[in-house]
Amino acid sequence: MKIWINRAGQNLGTFTLEEVQRGLDQGRFVSTDLGWQEGMETWKPLAEFPGLRMPQSEVAPPSLAPVPPTSPDTPPPLAEQTLATVEGEEDGPAWERRRELGLFKALTQTWKEILFNPTASFARMKSSGGFTAPFLFNLTMVLIWAFFTLIYRLLLTGVFAAAASSMHNESNYMAGIGAGTSMLAIIVIFVMAIPLIVAFNFVSAGITHLCLALFKGTSKNYEATYRVMCYAYSAWVFALVPCAGGIVAGLWALVSSIIGLSKVHKTEGWRAAVGVLLPVFVCVGLVVAIYVAIFAAILSSVRNANT
């Protein structure tokens, strides 16, 4: 018999009892998710669902008010009280439970939650509890990105060096020195880039929080905004794909940030979008203005030289 699963008002699908149990054991489902199957009079938290075994670290939530089903073969609608109770539970993302799930499982599970179900995931995201967990997630994502990018760069440098040495046999020694120097420069750049990127995320979250506050879109403090910005870095997993992966990662991170801020701060989507995109537009505008000024200066100097 199929079981309907619902989280924060979002339908997660229908599953067999064995699939739900496996999902609980793997961290895909949590005890506060609501379940319903034919013959039941109400949605119940999985912690109160017959036939399921909760992980030892899970705590059973309080009982929810019964809701009569609309028909014998479809799940009953969630009452407003039920939705409020579920949305009030903050137990995610999976990275916050990495000690229970293990580092790798917590990391991949967080990617799945943020990338493929951001609305429900950010609605249940912990908005307080310290900066350590989101900071470590941000650092982990940057390290993964830097590692694979460095490997790609070194491979590309090696290919070009091999091609150059094959074309000029007499300068193999110099080509080897040049390739080694280039690789060393790349490594130094990435060693410097990692702490700068992680530090910049603190500044970026502060600027975003300020822009959001200017448009009256904040309901929580800076920590909540920082957490959203850190977990939105899940999109950087797409940057591991060469070429177009970086573009996809950037766009997906922006979308995830907008959804996350709107859910965490409980504000309209357009306010969250302004908070995220306004700094981007300002930076792009400044860069364009600088290039225009440089081009105008060069053009003016050329005209003066001709006259």
Image: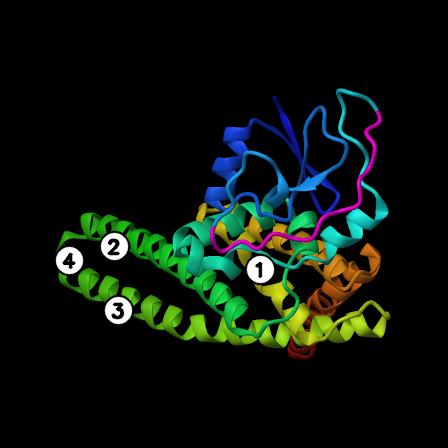
Q: Position of residue 153 (x, y in %)?
A: 35, 56
| Distance between the alpha carbons at the discs numbered 2 and 1 | 38 Å
Residue nearer the viewer, 34 or 226: 34
Residue type beneath disc 4: Asn
Residue nearer the viewer, 17 or 169: 17
Do callouts 2 and 4 mark residues in contact (Cβ within 8 Å)?
no
Quarter the C terminus occupies: bottom right
Q: Which residues are magenta?
A: 56-70
| Distance between the alpha carbons at the discs numbered 1 and 3 | 36 Å
Task: Residue under label 4, please give it.
Answer: 172
Q: Position of residue 174 (x, y in %)?
A: 18, 64
Residue 181 disc label: 3
Residue at screen point 20% across, 53% down: 165
Residue at screen point 64% across, 78% down: 305
Quarter the N terminus occupies: top right
Task: Residue under label 2, please give it.
Answer: 161
Residue at screen point 44% across, 71% down: 193
Q: Secondary structure at mark 2?
A: helix
4 or 1: tag closer to the N-terminus? 4
| Distance between the alpha carbons at the discs numbered 3 and 2 | 11 Å
3 or 4: tag closer to the N-terminus? 4
Task: Residue under label 1, please give it.
Answer: 231
Where 73 falls versus 137 (above or below)? above
Do callouts 1 and 3 mark residues in contact (Cβ within 8 Å)?
no
Nearer the observer: mark 1 or 3; the answer is 1
Badge 1: how crowded within 10 Å, few (<14), some, or many (20+)? many
2 or 4: tag closer to the N-terminus? 2
